[in-house]
Each structure stands twice: as C-alpha cells, then as structure tokens.
Amino acid sequence: MRSIMLVWVWCVLLASLDHQTFMIQGHLLPVKDVKVFPEHNITIEGGTWVLNVEWTDVENAVPEKLMYDIEVLLTEQEKRLHYETIEVKRDLSTPHRWKWTSLFPLECTSLSVRLRYRDQNQTGPWSPLYPYEGTARNPDTHVYPHDQSFLVGSNITFCCITETPLENCTIPISNRTYISEPYQLQSRTGQQNLKCGYYGATVFVGYPPDDQDLRCVTRDLISVECNWTFGRDTLVTEKTTLTKYTLNGRKCEVNKVEEFGHCAVNEANVTNWTLIAINPLGVKILNYTADPLHRVFLKAPTNVHTRAVYERNATINWDWNVKAYDSFLMICQVELNGHLYNKNFSGSRLTSIVLVDLQPFTNYTAKVSCGSSENFYMWGDWSDITRFRTKEDIPEALDVWIQYLEQNAYVLSKPLTKEQSHGVLTGYELTTIDPKNEISIQSETLCYPVSFGNKMSDRKISVSAKNSAGLSPPANITITSYPGVNVSQIRGINGGFNISWEERSSSSCGYVVDWFQTYSKKKCDLKWIKIPPGHLSTRIQSESLHSGVRYTVSVYSCTAGAPQLLQKSEGYAIEQRPSEKVQDLTGSVNGRNLLLSWKEVPLDEQKGFIQGYRVTTIPSGADKAYISTITNETSVQLTLDPGTYDITVAAFTSAGEGVNATFPTTMNKSHMYDEMIVAMVLGSSVAALVFIIIAFLCYRKKKWIKKMLYPDIPKPKLLGQWATKRMYCSQMTEPYIKCEIQEIHGIDPTSTSLEPAEDSALISSNSSSGPVNLSYQNVSELSFVLSYPSVTSFITSDPLSSSSDAKMLTSFIENPTYIMSWPADVSQISGPTLEMDDAYHPAPTVVQTFLETDGNYKPHALL
C-alpha cells in the first residue's frame, strides 16, 4: 500500500514539473513563430478572400490537447473583425494552420492577427500583431472584388479604395477604404455590375457544373466513346471561367452548343471511366463502369438500296464500312413508311433482307438499324432512306349494293381505296344475267341504272373493277322489284342512330343497313354497312350524318337470292329548329271569331319532327304578348275583341321554334254590329216565313183543325127535375138573348114555364161529345149576354118531368167550376136536359187528351 502511494505522489510531482515548463512564474508562455498569408500564398487579381494563419506548438508543451485564442483586427482602426477559440492536438513536428474567410477581399485594407494560449480559464499573453498589408497603400482607386465568379444568391461586400466615400461604398474601415452593405447576387444574366463613383466592378454569377448521365459505348469495337448531358446551365460564359472536362485524365474538348457532351478514348479494354467537370464555382465527378463489348452501339449501314421489287415483296441490300463488323453477330430492324416492320433479321455481318406482305402499287420508304445479337445493348444509328414502289396487282372485290329511287333501281359500289385498287383503275365491267341471256357492259362509273322493261323480274348482276393487271373477283347481287314496307319513325341518340331488328332464318350472309337523305333525289347518294350473321343491331355514327337532315334508314336481310327488306324508318340524328315559316297563312273573320289556316313547313326545311304549332296573339300597343294556343292542326279559331292584332304562327320541333309567320288583322265594332243585325234580320225573316207557311197550311186545313181542336158545341138541354136555381132568357136585339139565373124557393112544375123564343126548334142530342166547360160564380143573380152569330138557344121544360130530373139539373148548375164529362150514354138520361149547340168554347180537355194520345183516348164515366 505504501508503494502505491509513493508512485502516485511521484506522478503528481512530475506533472507539476511538466506544467511548470509550459508556464513561467504561473503565467502561460506567449505564442511565437506566427505566419500570416493568403490562400496558397498567392493573390488572385480580382480579390483574395481566405487568410491563412500558421504557427507551431511550444516545445515543452505537455498536454495532449492545446487551446488557442485567435483574433483578427483591422490594423489601422485596431477594431476586432473576428475572435475564435480553437482546440488542436499537440504536434511538435507539423505546424498548425487556421483559415479565415473575410467578409470583403483581403486587398481592401491591412489586417492583423494575434494568438494566445488558453488553459481552461487561464490565458497567456497575446502574441505580437502579424499584419497582412493588402493593397490599400496603392495610390490608385480600385474596387474589389472584380472579374470573379460567385454562386447565385451569395452575399458579397464590395470595397472601394479611395480618399472619400463614394456611391454604394460609404462605410469606412481604414483611412482610404470604404465598404458597401452586403449585396445579394440574384442576377440570372450571368453577371452583376457595381458602380463606385466613376469606377466600377463586374462580377459573374452562376452555378457549379451539373453534368449528368455519363454513358460509355464502343462503336467500332476498338475504341470507347462517352456521352453525358450538361444538366443545368452554369451561366458562366467567360472563356476563363468556362467548365473544363477530363475523361480518365485526358482533356476533352467539349462544344456546349451540342445537346450532349462527347469524348472518346482509344481503349476498348477499360471498364471504368471517370469524367471530371470543373469551373470556378465547383466540381462535378461522374463515374461509369461496364464491359465495352456489352455496350455496343453500331454505326449506320451505308449504300442501302433495293435489288428486286415485285407486287407484294422486295429485297433490300446495304454495306458496312467498319472492318471489325465482318464476323460480328448482329440483329437488324427495318422502318417501313415510318412504322417498324413486324419482323427482325439476324446474322453475321448481315447485309440483305427480304420484305414480304407488301401492298401492290404502293410507294414505300425504308431504312435499317442494327445492334449486337449476343449482348444487345441498344439499336445503332439509322441508315439513309431508300425508296421503291411495288408493282400492280388485280383489284380487290367491290362492295356493291342497290338503291331504289322513284321506282328505278341502281347498282352502286363503294370506291376502292388506293390500297384496295392495287394500281390505277381503268373502269368497271358489269354482267347482267337473266333466265334468257347474259350481257356484259363496260362502264367507267360506280353507279349503273338497271332497267326491268315491261316485266319486273329478278336480275342477277356481277360487277368487277379493272386495272392493268386484270379484273377483280366479281361482286354479285340480285335485284328485284321495289320492295314495300311501312315507314316508322326513329329518334337520333347522341348524333347517331341505334338500329336493331329481328333475326331472320332466311338470312344466310348477314344483314345490310343503308341510309340516305330522305328528300334528296340524287341517284347513288346512298351509304350502307354490311353486318355479319348473328348480329342484330348496329349504330350509324354521327360522322356520316348531318344535323337537321331527315334520313331514311332501311334494314335488309342478305339471302342466297335477292335481299329482303325487313324494316324502314325515318328520323333525324340531331334535330334543329325549323328553318322556314309555315306556308300560305290566311285568315277569315266571322264576327268576333278569326279562323286561321296554313300549310306545313316544306319538308326539307322542317329540320326535325314537327310536334305542333304555337299561335301567338299580340295586341297593338300591348307590352305583353299573349300566347293563344298550341295546336297540332294546321288551323285554329280565335275569339278576339275589337282592335288590331299581329298573330304569329311558328312550327316547333324538339329543338325549339322555327321562324314566325305573321298575319296582321283588325277586328272592327261596326263590322261586328252589321253582322249581328244581318243575323237578326235573317233570323226574323226565316221565322216570319215559317209562320206564314204554317198560317197558310192552317187556313187550308181549317176545317180539319177545327174538327180536331174545336169541335161544335152541342145546344144545352135541361133534363130531369128543375133545380132550385133557374135560368131565364129573353130575346134582345137579334141575334142576342139575355139569360138570368134566379133562385126558386118553391118548385111547381105545372106553373113553371120557360117561354121559348120565336122561330126556334127544340134540339136534343145524344151526342157523346166532351162536356161543356162552364165557369160561373155562385152569386144570387148573374146577368150576362151571350153573343153567338146566327145561333138561337132554347131552354125547354117538360111539365111532366119528375123532381129527380130537377135535382139533376140543380146539381149540374150548382157546381159551375167543376169540369164534367158526359156520361157514356147520354140517351139514357130522362127528363129535361139543357143542351147548347153551335156555341164557341175552348177545346175540351177530352179533345186535347185525344190529340196528345194520337186518337187512342177513350172517355170514361164521370164518377
């Protein structure tokens, strides 16, 4: 234990002795042998920014890590610019170096540097000041920095060495130096200028190199070519600041006008390539590693030409101008008319290929490119273009169809395209076959009329196209008489027609849908499409249809014989408003009624299905238009008040209303009143005429009418016993008599008498005529005068009549308001009877009932 303590004490003593060698009388030693110089110990013409400070450690310094305080000052003003404490590892063999970048160029003024030791909180004395003079003592005026390159966005402080402050440089740092505020360089033009009084400086602004995508290939199998992209523009355009390139240490001349950088070396066995790009603002290093034989980029074939050209194939030959390709396995591709040919070709030193499946009589352009077949990397350069034309061949078969137009039939064909014609067409050959003979006709058109003569029989027609190579395969069709079928409406959907139909078992070769403009009478103006068997719908696209045009669409079944019409419809792919007015708008006035009538819009101007007509009444001077009615008819009746009107009629479709047709009219009051008066007079005249005719007929038939309506009234008879009320009549001035009814309190048949008038006769009647309707007032005495021309009435009395008869008469007279009916058998009544004859009276109820029942009335006994 004692030994351990001795060792520890010994170590502390040694440490204290070593530490004392680093200090004198308790103070740290000063730093000596300090050197101050710019970067690389050279001064750049436009300005130096980095200051280097170099010194060595004290020989007796014991600590492994030493600390130094470093201070940079403005020499003349003794003003601190920078202060820093650094820690370094003790190194007695190599001096320490510290770098400091100034805020302004070192040439602007004189700077001084000093150092001192630091041991935790204890510091040594400062070393002497070590100056860096710069160029401030030069009597000439200068501005720093100038003609230097800086990154875009850098903050730069300029200084001006002059006797007095000038524009932009106003902050003094010495007796002859003034600096500017930090100036941020944001120019995208590549340079920035600063003016300081009559002097100025120019600096360049840009970016370091940004090259990308280094790739190295071999083209001739003995050398290597490297390519890369330049990346972002550096903006540095001065010759002394342009980017410089080296490839594997060899200088590369690069033309930045080109899109890619390019550099070649004659080393095909190197597998690693390094590209270095450098400019004053930075460095970019790119590396690429690969076996050159796996990066083969073949050159273009030369002397490409065609050796043999036929209708549907051609042979292409070419040469190679690279000796190393003689035994090289390659694969080649061909671009034909701007599209890659569907087959590649392989071989050793390939120089010839055959192209097949070409179109006859067609112009072609071809070029060739090849690559490595074993280790394919990329296709080589394209050769020059060679041109050739294949020979003619017979045309393809025509697509023929039928058009029926005004009871005529036309055979027409779709034009063959250039590829289908296989040459220059010289005409068409039509062969008509009927049961009796066969006729061939040469035609130069695609539309041929077929005549049936007097007999409408089926015709089989064969059509072929012709060129210098011969006739195309025949296209056959059988034509029959014009088929008839009901026409329906079809609506367009999204600018086209969706067509569907029912399947027909007789359809052996599919279906045909054709369409044409309904109101166009142009022959062979027909389009059609053929539908394969099993398909029962299709769509007619809008490309072949026009807006506002009515089309007739027909569907045929293709059979072994003549096509069979299945359905026909008419419609508009896109409906529009009618483009024309209604025709012949007229009106007729009848009192307050106006009858308008018109004819339809012309068919080819309807532009859609007419859904109706809008009739608008516009009173003169009114602010508001009054819509009268919407009708589907071509006439309408309006009731109008007196005034002036403009009445418009417009047809409308689903797309809207068409052009208005206007009918102006005036409704006059006097005209209306005249019409009313005429109507009244005419009605009165008709009524008067009818009355006269009826009166004349009544006059001619007066006896019959009198007999039917007013038969003769029988003379009264007094039957039976006298009643207590009696009637007394006396002769007055002829032919009048006076009658009185008196009440008799006593009945004496023997003393009672009625004196008949002179020249009279007793008339009794058993007639069964209707009862006499007499209305009297029940008063004690009633005097009245009866006037009957040429009529004499008698009241007779039988002195022998019984009292029962008198009671009957009394009963008869006492109830004068009661309407009686004669008994069924008047002759059975005994005693005196009061009868009246030839007297006028209203038609009895019995007669009226008789007429109303057409003579079937049967009188009944009075109960």
Image (cartoon, rainbow, N blue to C red):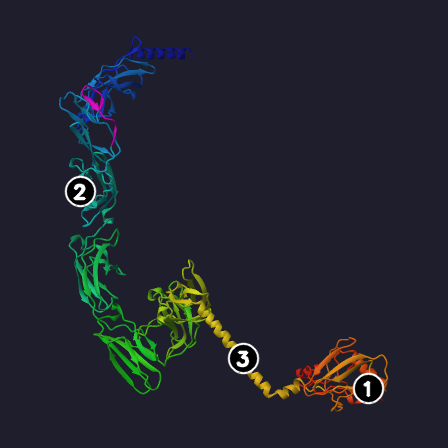
Choose between 209 and 269: the one closer to the eye.
209
Marks 1 and 2 in Cβ contact (< 8 Å)? no
Q: Is residue 327 magenta?
A: no
Return the disc, 1 or 2, that comes first in the chain's sequence: 2
Find disc 2 in the rendering and name its residue: 254
Determine which quarter of the picture holds residue 646. Answer: bottom left
Of tags 1 and 3, the one toward the viewer is 1
Q: Residues under labels 1 and 3: Cα distance?
A: 56 Å
Q: Is residue 176 magenta?
A: yes
- Image location of residue 651, percent across then percent down: 40, 67
Determine which quarter of the picture holds residue 446. Answer: bottom left
Find disc 3 in the rendering and name its residue: 688
Which amino acid, mark 1? Answer: Ser
- Image location of residue 108, percent across then percent down: 19, 23
Farthest residue, direction front: 733
Which amino acid, mark 2? Answer: Val
Which amino acid, mark 3? Answer: Ala
Q: Secondary structure at mark 2?
A: loop
Choose between 725 and 271: the one closer to the eye.
725
The answer to whether residue 45 shows anywhere in this view is no
Bounds of the magenta segment: 170-184
